[in-house]
Amino acid sequence: MFVGTFCCFVAVNAQEKNYKLNIQVIDKDSIALQNVNVLIDNTSKTSTDQNGNVSFELAEGQHVFNFSHDTYFTKEINSFIENNQSIIIVLDTNDIALQEVILTAREDKGLTTKSIINRKAMEHLQPSSFSDLMELLPGGLSKTPNLTSTNRPLLRENSGVPTGYATSSLGIQFMIDDNILNTNSDMQRSINQGQMGYAPTAHNKITTGIDMRSISTNDIESVEIVRGIPSAEYGDLTTGLIKIERKLGKTPIQARLKVDGFSKQYYIGKGFKVKDNWSLNTSFDFLNAQSSPSDDTQNYQRISASIRSDVKLKLFNHPLRWKTNLDFAGSLDNVKLDPDNALAGIDSYKSYSRRVSVANNFIYVLPKEYFFNDVTFNTSIQQGLDRIEQTQFVQYAGPTTLPISTKEGENVGVFAKSSFISNYMTDGKPLDMNARFRTSGKRKWFGLSHAYEAGLDWRYSKNNGRGDVYDVLQPPSASMTTRPRAFKDIPATQNLAAFLGDRLDYKLNNHSFTLYAGLRVSKLLGVDKSYKISDQIFAEPRVNFQYGLPQFMVAGKPFQVDVTMGYGQFYKQPTTYYLYPNVQFRDYVQLNYYHNDEQYRYVSYMTYVQPQANKELTAAKNIKKEIRVDFTYNDHNFFVSYYNEEMKNGFRSVNQYNINSYKKYDAAQVDINNWTTNGPDLSNVSYTIIKEHAAYAKTENGSVTKKQGIEFQYRTPRFKSINTRFTLSGAWFETKYYNNIPVYEKPSVSVGGIPGSFPYVGVYENDDTYKNSNLNYNLMMDTYVPSLDLTFSASVQGSVFNHNMREKIVATPTSYIDLNGQTHAYTIADESDLYKQWLIRGVATSNPLSRKASYTVNVNLKVTKSIYKTLRASMFVTRIFNYENPYYYNNVKVELQNKPTPYFGMELNYNF
């Protein structure tokens, strides 16, 4: 029976015939379409080649074919296959889908002013890191990547930010997949900032927040950059919010190779469908960059890997979505001396960081009859492993002494070796935990539609690192003012916040009104009661209002105008670095007795231990106001907005002065015959008492940053005849920086030839004041031809003007402090005093210093083309044409000699 059945099966299959089917897919203009997805009998899937062709071998009988493409209408046909044949399929253009292909940032028309950047725009931009995406914002300009130094984020601000005004960058909150990137426990700052031409300074980020170099764009699906007033859900920010959403769901294997004159980047990722309700995404990314093509002394590397899970479940018969992310991120900054330098094999700077994070997001949909419709609970934990390692050859010209005591008072130092190799490091282990609970719902009462939200937000930051580690007998500098300190001894900080908000929608005839009102209340926990901020509660009201005018017809097309206004208060809490700075040690040599016999060498120090913590420090506050008008007509979109921001208490480091005194012994009176086990007998050695004002740094709420400006963007429809869209965007930025607390300065004038011995400290009402203003523009023409899968864009961008002014400081002090700690008013008579006349600061007669640059023009080109159905090639040239008009510096015309050079590169993308 088995043999009979088998023979019948073979006979039947022997009679079944397969036929070859050739299909060509074209559009109505007879242009072949590549990368059209072809689904056969809802089982097997393939796509057309560059000539629009695809071939099959199919069994005789009825078959169903489904043809789909992003910018064409889907078509399904049924065909009975009974012989070899060729057919042509014509697809109709989906004009709506074609209009949705946007290759720059799209401005949202909702309550909050924000830019949305999709995957298509990122692919065309060909970024190396998140820094490159900032070009797409109104007022943003393309730049040659600088991947060997920290890339600080800036919103509504030009790049000329003076020292001491970093709070704007620190106050930009980054979120990835609805989880906060918390950097509040970052303490990585080299103990020797001046090594190798101040190499460590270029990599500091503890005062500027996220380093945008560390964020790869390869996994990003979309980005929202909120420049306006976000809802009360988001806090611990002053300037803006950047929300990043990464790819989820099934995807083919995607690989990317990008090469340019400064870097090489490699990426591979894949999305799996484990089950119908479960998808898994994995990716790996590596970037290797150097400062210039011919200079390998500065190098930056970035590694990132990710596993993301998305599971859709049922809990009590209601949908529950569970998203889990496991991420690893690493970066390395490596600086070495030029090989021609004799010390190239010794001196080095290396800074690396490692981050491992786990996040779980739960979104649960509640029954419709409940007051709240959904509940979201997000948790994340991130452990960092950071280290700055430095090696330095130290050689002294003569006998040099070192202080080693960690206690205040008189102590005995040591004589250092004449030369040695100093190895030192900063070791950090920042631990950040975040939890956010949010619930929301929608109801309609009395003709008003309400969309309300409420929730809690908790953030925990603690650094468990070893901190500053070095041998006190072989320090990098003999004049160091610190001692080794462990970060793990610093308390953790916690930020707890509650928020509540409601959005009301109302329509009256053809008028529409939308109002959002929210309140966020936060408190910093875990801070000692001696700090002022420990008792403070911060309230942040947020209001946005939008009025949609009735549509009216122009040439038979609707014209829509929306007016949006917003007001919000925002607070950024001081970080661990600001709250708990290291103490400062001031070591004064009282006696330096050097003898050829080592047993008779002796150095006496007077050490002062100065705490630098500011217990009056509070959160930085920013008040934002804006008004925006949106116009929409026949797929033409235009917006213009005016904003005004004022932050009066940003964080800044300022000098304070203490009065220290010490003994100065007469070394000639030391008698080695009266030497004891503790050194010389100093009872009969005469000395003088010396007093001085000793400076120390303290973080204050003293930086004022005032911003105002106008942003605009006009975007045309994609003209069908040429498949081209025109986008004109730009912004006028005006930012003013100044301090609003007294400034303490001691003239660098010596008394009796003793440096630092000047007996007075001047108190001045202001520091340098800066005013920067510029008007940037960007005209982009992008062409997208779906039939060829070709994207081409040309942009003309630059500045209409760029003015930087440094206003005159007040030269004369309001008062001064003497060596007894007494404060005296500064009078006209003091201007002729032997010493006090030097308190008048030197101010350049040319002040206010001004740099007035006029227009610049840069032309950039980008092109992306699918070579085959799995391969996409891209290339770009930045500044293929460049012109900068001569500018004026203090009314003196300056002709530019070294103009920016073109920057170009290419990349390949594979989809298997």
Image: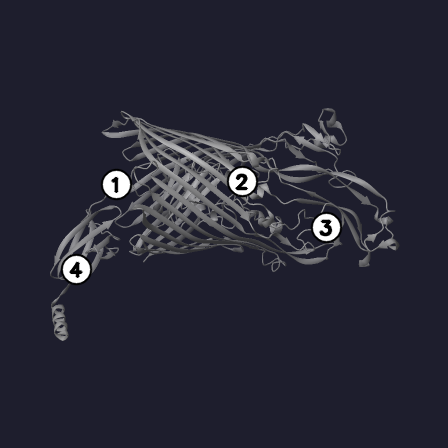
Q: Earlier in the sequence, mark 4 or mark 3?
A: 4
The image quarter in which residue 748 lies: top right
**Mark 3 Cα shell of 10 Å, populated few (<14), some (14-19), many (≥20):** many
Mark 4 lies on residue: 21
Q: Residue furthest front?
A: 316
Residue 730 rendering spot, x and y as whole percentages: 41, 35
- Badge 3 or badge 1: first in the primary sequence: 1
Q: CA distance from mark 1 to mark 2?
A: 52 Å
**Of the residues shown, which amino acid type is indicated by label 2?**
Leu
The residue where tag 2 is placed is 525
What residue is at 35 percent from the left and 44 percent from the top?
Answer: 364
Residue 292 in view in this figure:
no
Residue 427 pos. (x, y %): 58, 53
Q: Are marks 2 and 4 in contact (CB under 8 Å)?
A: no
Question: Label 4 vs label 1: CA separation?
Answer: 32 Å
Can see residue 629?
Answer: yes
Of badges 1 and 2, the one in the foreground is: 2
Q: Amino acid at mark 1?
A: Ile
The crowd level at tag 1 (other Cα within 10 Å; few <14, some 14-19, many 20+) is few
Horizontal side of residue 587 vs 216, given as left or right: right
Above or below residue 446? Residue 161 is below
Name the residue at 37% across, 34% down: 452
Which sits earlier in the primary sequence, circle 4 or circle 1? 4
Residue at disc 2, secondary structure: strand
Q: Which mark is residue 96?
A: 1
Q: Name the residue carrying label 3.
A: 403
